[in-house]
Amino acid sequence: MSGSHDHVEDETADLPLTALCWIGLGLATLDAFLQPLPQGLVWAALGLSYLTGGIPPLRTALHEMWHDGRLDIDLLMVVAAIAAASVGAALEGAVLLALFSLSHTLEHRSMGKARRAVEALMQLRPETALLDGPGGVVEVPVANLVPGDRVILRPGARVPVDCRVAEGSGHLDESTVTGESLPVRKAPGDPVHEATVNLDGILTAEVTRGLASSTVAQMIKLVTEAQAQKAPSERFSDWFGQRYTIAVFVGSFLSWFAFRALGHPPSEALYRAATLLVAASPCAVVISVPAAILSALSAAARGGVLFKGGAALEGLAEVRTFAFDKTGTLTTGLASVTSILALEGEEGHFLALAAGLEAQSEHPIAAAIRREAAERGIVPVPVRDARAHPSEGITGQDAEGAVWAGNARMLAAMGAVLPDALAPLADGAETLVLVGRGARVLGGLTVADEPRQTAAEALHDLKAGGRTDSLMMTGDRAPVAGRIGARLGLQPGEIHAGLLPGDKVKLVDAATQRGKVAFVGDGVNDAAALARADVGVAMGVAGSEVALQAADVALMAEDLRKLAAARALSRRAAGVIRQNLAISIGAMVILVTGSLFFDLPLPLAVLGHEGGTLLVVLNGLRLLVDPIRTKA
């Protein structure tokens, strides 16, 4: 039904017409099986059934022909019903239209349910919020909130818009946005997302984004766009359906001449041609793929995973190699400073300079240095003209002149030499950050990161789900990468250290020689590798519009197990698509064979055709009731 799933928003419009169609069929059936009714009433009942059951598909078919120059499958049903009536089988034609109308209506409602799975989040946002303004706390419409406003979040209240905690602490239920099953503790500085629930504590939060650009708004926008983007299998089914529809029309027309040539009377030849028209209609084939794709996309979104279309869903099922960025992806990204060695001046001043340089950086190592300074009560040195150098470090200007912080590449770029006093730190399994002025090294500090608790389990699940390779890519030194990789169960050949952004792209290109590659990163810093991979996956991006736009798949929560679960869902969807195609094509072959060689009655062709269509839709909807889940 090529036109039937394009207007899901009007999913109840055909319900009254379907009811009238069945009422007309019921009256006509009473005349045939129970007791004779006045012929005028019988013809009126059949006319009601034909009009209410035939006008909607005829309208759709004419729209497709006029605007797109396409022969719609709905036209097949209308033509078959008219052909049946013309040979004295008006009741069979009414049965066809009634079942087709019912199938049409149920399909609309089923596919609408799939599309509404994420849009239901809109119902969760409150209409008002408690604004903490100059005149005290007042209740205002959520739509009036702007970035910078402060709102009060009481226990049990839903977060009205995306905010950042300013005062207080407590636990929030983020399952509606990230799919996280356990409450998440929030403290000052932490982001809180629209539609999540404050479970305990009274929080004062500062609005970071307005309603139009909120996390939920971005999710719904992406899901809507994803459902509009067709997967390769969907494009094939559309291509097949259009051309096959023309073939069915031509074949049915030719079959009338064939049956006449075999000696059948004109009315019987027309009846069998109409039966063939119904039996060969590819409705089930055309709807079988989108039924599964839309259900899987919605199920994934409910579990906190956003696919940017059916192509990404199908691509993830075929991935041979998963390449991971290390920092912030396989590790927590909440690194901590483990040692400080100042070669000139006091340790406090050295740390203040390092924190000043890293003040504008979003890198986890920079955050660790800033946290260390804050915990010691050290005020960062003001640094201006800060400039990041990817995979090297950062440069800037303070009151004394040019200053830099970075790794061994930055050291070499500045023409400096590693002092002997810092050599033991450079040989360890922790990240060394050097600070200097020109060729003079002022000191160094080490930072260590820890693997995510779920990372090892996720890597195991990905490998257990089929023949899959895993790669870890990082700009850190080999000892640092080796320490993390060993704890994650990775083999030495799967660990790649000391990489520049371009090196990651080259490794992705090399991995594609073995099959499809998925790159998993933060969606911003790894943009080049995400773009080059067959499937780009950004993780932990709830609230980040840039990251949501950067990848093909977005994990809303920082839980890599959801990637393994999403891959499992994509493989289940691929299996359902294969089942649906087998069911629809198999049923079509049986019905066509029966109509050509075994004098299949038109009512049986109708039941087989519509039954197959409903079966593939319901089979696809199985994915909707089995969303992505991870163990707590």
Image: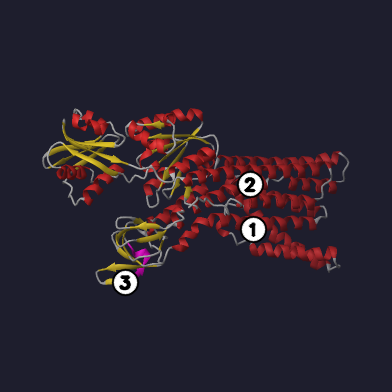
Residue 498 visible here: no
The amino acid type found where label 1 is placed reads: Thr
10 Å neighbourhood of mark 1: few (<14), some, or many (≥20)?
many
Residue at 46% from the left image edge and 60% from the top image edge: 122
- Of the two numbered discs 2 and 3 on the same chain, state the one appearing first in sequence: 3
- Residue 143 included in the magenta stretch of the image: yes
Residue 421 image position (x, y, % from top left): 19, 32
Residue 603, position in %: x, y? 79, 53
Looking at the picture, which amino acid does disc 2 mark?
Answer: Ser
Q: Nearer the viewer, residue 134 or 60?
A: 134
Sequence-wise, which precedes: disc 1 or disc 3?
1
Which residue is tagged 3? 138
Q: Residue at x 73, y 45 (%)?
A: 587
Q: Nearer the viewer, mark 1 or mark 2?
A: 2
- State which region is magenta: 139-145
Between the C-alphas of marks 1 and 3, the distance is 47 Å
Write down the residue under mark 2: 288
